[in-house]
Amino acid sequence: GEGGERPKRAARPPRTDRPERAERGAPSGGEGEASSSGNPPEPGSQLFIGNLSWETGWQDLKDHFRTIGEVERADVAVGRDGRKKGFGFIRYSAAEDAKKAMDELNGVEFMGRPLEVRLDNKA
């Protein structure tokens, strides 16, 4: 008996980062509580960044994409083992900056690899 067999797939906890019903366009609860951080991103302002070098961290990504416009948020996907997955996301304050970044940075080499820059269609 070999023993120590782990079940093939651990039960994943439910994703809590997305609320079940997005209340888009619903009036907010009170006046003056619209803070810029709480608003949903402008449509078309979030980008998927592929083909990242394994060394690239979110800070590198943010610094690189800040050359185009104001970056609200930068993320690099990391697996459960702590290793980077080679892709990430950039969110600009304005959709036109995202479009400009697609035009100017897609296919351009960054940290040794040509980046894939496209709209994040899940945003």
Image: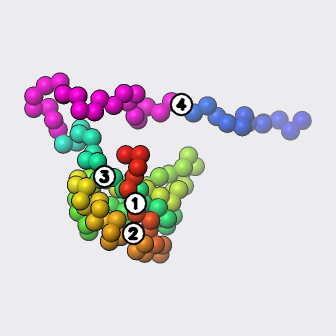
Q: Which marked residue is nearer to the observer: mark 1 or mark 4?
A: 1
Q: Is residue 24 visible?
A: yes
Q: Look at the numbered discs 4 and 3 and tell me whether their residues touch, using CB distance below 8 Å.
A: no
- Residue 66 or residue 81, whichever sits in front: 66
Lower sequence index among marks 2 and 4: 4
Left or right: where does residue 84 sit relative to residue 4?
left
Specify the label residue 13 is tagged with.
4
Q: Which residue is mark 3?
A: 44
Lower sequence index among marks 4 and 3: 4
Specify the label residue 118 is tagged with.
1
Q: In percent of the image, x 37 and y 62: which residue is there?
A: 61
Q: In percent of the image, x 25 and y 55: which residue is there?
A: 95
Examine the rendered structure and indicate whether residue 72 appears above or below residue 63: above
Q: Position of residue 51 (x, y in %)?
A: 49, 65
Q: Which residue extends farthest left?
A: 32
Q: Amino acid at mark 4?
A: Pro
What predominant SS class does the magenta segment belong to?
loop
Q: Look at the numbered discs 1 and 2 and tell me whether their residues touch, using CB distance below 8 Å.
A: yes
* Quarter of the figure that contains the N terminus: top right
Left or right: where does residue 41 sit relative to residue 30?
right
Examine the rendered structure and indicate whether residue 61 appears above or below residue 8: below
Q: Which residues are magenta?
A: 13-35
Q: Which residue is mark 2?
A: 106
